[in-house]
């Protein structure tokens, strides 16, 4: 027979385990755990001159509790452009050719909702930083508010570039 004090202790430990919930290494209060990046397979021409001078991507932020795209209410989202092609799971070791930062207020006009949830559409020129090769790789990075949260990096989108 289990003594009453031991039963109470077991009941208290069980209660604490149930109340503790799940921990995540994601962004904390924002609920964002993953980024999903979709890009056009080819670069785009954004002016009247022939040749590509930018790219277009769409980003969805999702969490463990919601499979659909979430609204980014805090922190910032960055679009990173790299020269060359990278494989999924391969983290780029070089510095980005260009980084476009967007805070939550700047993201509002870029947001739209569809069957996948809320997504953010970016058509970005590389301007004074054109790629040197025939492929670029784009990533999205979410930087949550707060010092205890780690940035979240999307998978890569490899985009073909036609030389000017």
Image (tube, helix red, strand yellow):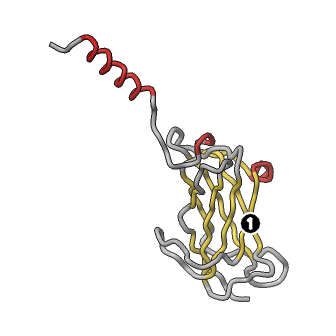
Between 96 and 47, which is closer to the camera in this rendering? 96
Q: Picture coordinates of residue 38 (x, y %)?
A: 59, 62
Between 144 and 70, which is closer to the camera in this rendering? 144
Q: Quadrant of the C terminus?
A: bottom right
114 in relation to 16, above or below: below
158 in relation to 112, above or below: below
Q: Residue at the location (67% across, 85% down)?
A: 162
Q: Which residue is mark 1?
A: 100
Q: Quadrant of the N terminus?
A: top left
Q: Residue furthest left?
A: 1
Q: Is residue 34 left or right of residue 133?
A: left
Quarter assignment of residue 39: bottom right
Q: Picture coordinates of residue 113 (x, y %)?
A: 67, 45
Quarter assignment of residue 35: bottom right
Between 159 and 93, which is closer to the camera in this rendering? 93
Q: Is residue 38 left or right of residue 105?
A: left
Say which element carries label 1: strand
18 in relation to 107, above or below: above
* Number of numbered discs overlaid on the protein picture: 1
Q: Residue at the location (68% across, 83% down)?
A: 131
Q: Residue at the location (65% across, 55% down)?
A: 143
Quarter assignment of residue 52: bottom right
Q: Picture coordinates of residue 149 (x, y %)?
A: 60, 50
Q: Residue furthest top?
A: 4
Between 84 and 160, which is closer to the camera in this rendering? 84
Q: Picture coordinates of residue 28 (x, y %)?
A: 58, 43
Q: Residue at the location (63% across, 87% down)?
A: 133
Q: Is residue 113 left or right of residue 7?
A: right
Crowd tier of the residue under label 1, counting other residues whose Cα lies within 10 Å: few below 14, some 14–19, many 20 or above: few
């Amino acid at each position: 027979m289990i003594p009453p004090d031991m039963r109470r202790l077991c009941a208290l430990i069980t209660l604490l385990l149930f109340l503790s919930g799940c921990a995540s290494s994601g962004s904390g209060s924002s609920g964002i755990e993953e980024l999903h990046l979709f890009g056009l397979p080819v670069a785009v021409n954004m002016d009247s001159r022939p040749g590509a001078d930018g790219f277009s991507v769409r980003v969805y932020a999702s969490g463990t509790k919601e499979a659909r795209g979430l609204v980014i209410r805090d922190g910032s989202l960055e679009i990173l452009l790299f020269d060359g092609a990278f494989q999924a799971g391969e983290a780029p070791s070089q510095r980005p050719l260009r980084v476009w930062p967007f805070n939550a207020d700047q993201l509002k006009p870029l947001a739209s909702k569809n069957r996948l949830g809320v997504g953010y559409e970016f058509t970005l020129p590389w301007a004074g930083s054109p790629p040197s090769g025939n492929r670029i790789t784009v990533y999205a990075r979410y930087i949550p508010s707060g010092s205890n949260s780690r940035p979240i990096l999307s998978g890569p989108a490899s985009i073909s570039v036609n030389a000017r």
